[in-house]
Each structure stands twice: as structure tokens, then as C-alpha cells.
Image: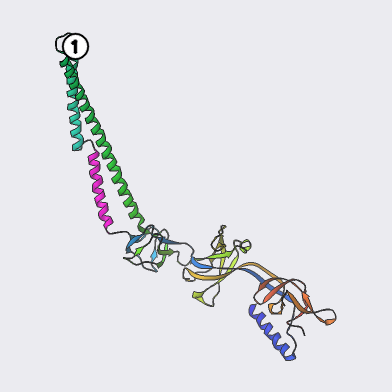
Amino acid sequence: MKKFCILALAGLAALSSCKKEPASFKVTTQAINEAVYASGEIMPAEYEVIKAVTSEHILKILVAQGNQVQKGQVLAVLGQPSQNTQLDILDKQLRLARQNASDSSARARELRQKAVLARKQYEQDSAEAQNYRELAAEKAVPAQEARHRAIKAQASLTEYNNLQYQYRALRDDQRGNVLSVSKQLAQLRELRETNVLTSSIDGKVFSIYHTEGSTAAAGDPILLTGSAGRFKLELLVDERDIAQVKLGQKVFFETDAFAGKQFTATVSKIVPVIQKENRSFKVEAGVAGTAAFFPQSSVEANILIRQANALAIPSTFLLPGDSIWTAGAGGKVVKQKLNTGARSGPWIEIKSGLKAGDLVYEKAP
């Protein structure tokens, strides 16, 4: 239809040039397509950008660009070679700490045995002190000797209590050491697991951003994987146009990777949160067909928001201020004010001011 309209205008121009008259056009009904412009990029329908959680050295990359991958497959390993050695050391430290924290440890046995002896000594000294108190009360032994036996019994009790305290402190310290080493080991294992990068989808490796031996900063992308053969558009729509965009609307788009070709998609998702940095809304559209697109390629798109048959004239005929030269009463050419609508290719919609069959002119005769 677009080519037909352009050829028709060319024919009118040629005819009028022969008669040396302004080009004219008879108002008719045309197919009007109204669209909202959007820009963005094309991505796999399902994808993930795998990133480094912390700044890490890249030990191994186990896939190549273009490889097919499965969910759960290990793609790369980050970290330091010394981490394996650190894990071994912490494992040994934890075993030793647990042995020391058990009741069978040498230090624990020693303190328990000393406490048993100290208790026996205290019981013996306490009995003697009681005996001497009774004898002193009967004047059988000097009072000073009774006091000496009481002091000795108190010292035995203090020794027994001190050994009990040492035993409890040892147990608390050993248990705390077990917890500390266990925490260090868990953190290192978690870090190691975090640094083993796996795929969460079945698909294809589209891009590898780093090489083995390089260092990735925290948040740096390492790999891009995604579904093979299925793509979507991630578009930005201006906040002034978003109210006109609906699910299921058709999208026509072009990408520089396929210059001169037009593709279609369908609006599948509208994210209802404005992006403050550009005052736009994110819109996704599923791409029709299985063309081998290149992820992250930029696209320019038109989201079709209305299709209608309406009165239209070539946009080149419209004068500033939305008016037109047209044949008035008696055939006299006059300037007529119009109420215009959407532009569609070379056409502009006429909402009021003209009717079908009216003759309009590109300029005054």
C-alpha cells in the first residue's frame, strides 16, 4: 500500500507539471496505522547475565561462546588457588577443636582428676576441722589448733572451686573455638560455592566477557546465556505514550544487524514502574519467528496502537496551521482549516474539515 501511494503521488505530480498547474488530490479513504515509537535491544526470550558477587580471580572458564548448556552445568570457577589449601587447614583445625572440646581431651581429663582429688582433700580437711572444733569446745585441744584446721579446710574448698571454674572455662573456650572455626569454614565453603558459576537454564552461551586469569570486579558480568532460537525485545517507551500501549499489540522493528529488514513482535509485558533516569517505562515484546538475532543489538520499533480506514490526504499538501487549499463554492480555491489526526507513512488523517471526493491542492493555483 505504501508503494502504491507514493507512485500515485508521483503520477499526480507528473500530470500537473504537464499542465503547469499545482498538484491536486481527491480526498479518499486510506488505511491509517497509528504507532508509538520505542527503542531498546533484542535479547533471548529467557536469559541470565551471570555476574561475580565479589571481586575475584577467574580460575577456569569451562565453556565457549556458542556452546549449548544445560541447567545446573558448571560454566566457570572463580576465586584463588589457595582456597583449597585454606579449606584443608580449616578442616583439620575443626577436627582438632572438636577433639579438644570433648570430655576425653587430655586437659579436660587432667582438670577433672584434680577436681576429684581436691574434693576428697576438702572433705577430709572439713571433717578434721569439725572434729577439732568439737575437741576445742571440750578444752581437749587448743583453740588455735582448731582455727588452723578450719583455715586448711577453707583453702581446700577454694582449691576445689577453682579447679571446677577452670574446667568450665576450658569447656566454654573450647566450644567457642569450635564455633569460630566452623563459622570460618562455612564462610569459605559458601564463598567457594558462590564462585562456582552454574547455568540456571537450558540454552546457549551467547557471550563471555572475561578470560581465564583476569580479575572480575564485584557485579561484573562473566557470561551471558539464554534460550536459543527464541527472542524478545526490551523496549523503553516515553511516559507520555505508555497509556496507549496494551498487551497483545503488534510491534514492527528493525535492527542494524539486519539492515533494511523489518521484523514483527507482540507486546507481552508492561512494567508499571517508571525509570526515573530517562522518564520511560520498560515494555517487553515476544519476537515472531526463529531468526538468529544477536543479543544486545539495538532496535528501533513502532508499537501499533490503532488501525483504521479514515479520510486522508498526502502530508505534503498540509499547510502550516493545519489548513489546506481546496475547491470551495463555485470552484474557487480557498484555504480550509482542518482537524487532523495520526500520520501514517505519506498520509495524514483528516478528522474534520473535508469529505470524501473533495479536491485539494498542494499550493494555491
Give the residues drawn in magenta, as a range: 79-102
Q: Is residue 300 above or below residue 199?
A: below
The question of residue 95 being in magenta is answered with: yes
Q: What is the magenta segment's predominant secondary structure?
A: helix
| Quarter location, residue 160 | top left
Residue extending furthest toward the left: 141
Instruction: Locate residue 21: give its quadrant.
Output: bottom right
Left or right: 301, with 90 as reference point: right
Question: Please, is residue 14 above or below residue 250 in the view?
Answer: below
97 left or right, relative to 49: left
Residue that lies at the very extreme toward the top in this rendered image: 138
Q: Position of residue 258 (x, y in %)?
A: 50, 75
User: Please, which residue is most extreme toward the front here?
Assistant: 144
Residue 298: image location, x then y, percent: 50, 70
Type of amino acid at the residue the image marks with label 1: Glu
**Residue placed most toward the observer, 59 or 285:** 59
Q: Nearer the viewer, residue 122 or 331?
A: 122
The picture places residue 332, in percent across and down from the top left corner, at 82, 82
Q: Secondary structure at mark 1?
A: helix
Q: Residue at x 69, y 83 (%)?
A: 9
Q: Which part of the image, by quadrant, shows the C terminus?
A: bottom right
Residue carrying label 1: 134
> Quick one: quadrant of the N terminus?
bottom right
Q: Residue at x 41, y 58 (%)?
A: 200
**How many numbered markers are drawn?**
1
**Residue appearing at x 53%, y 70% in the figure:** 299
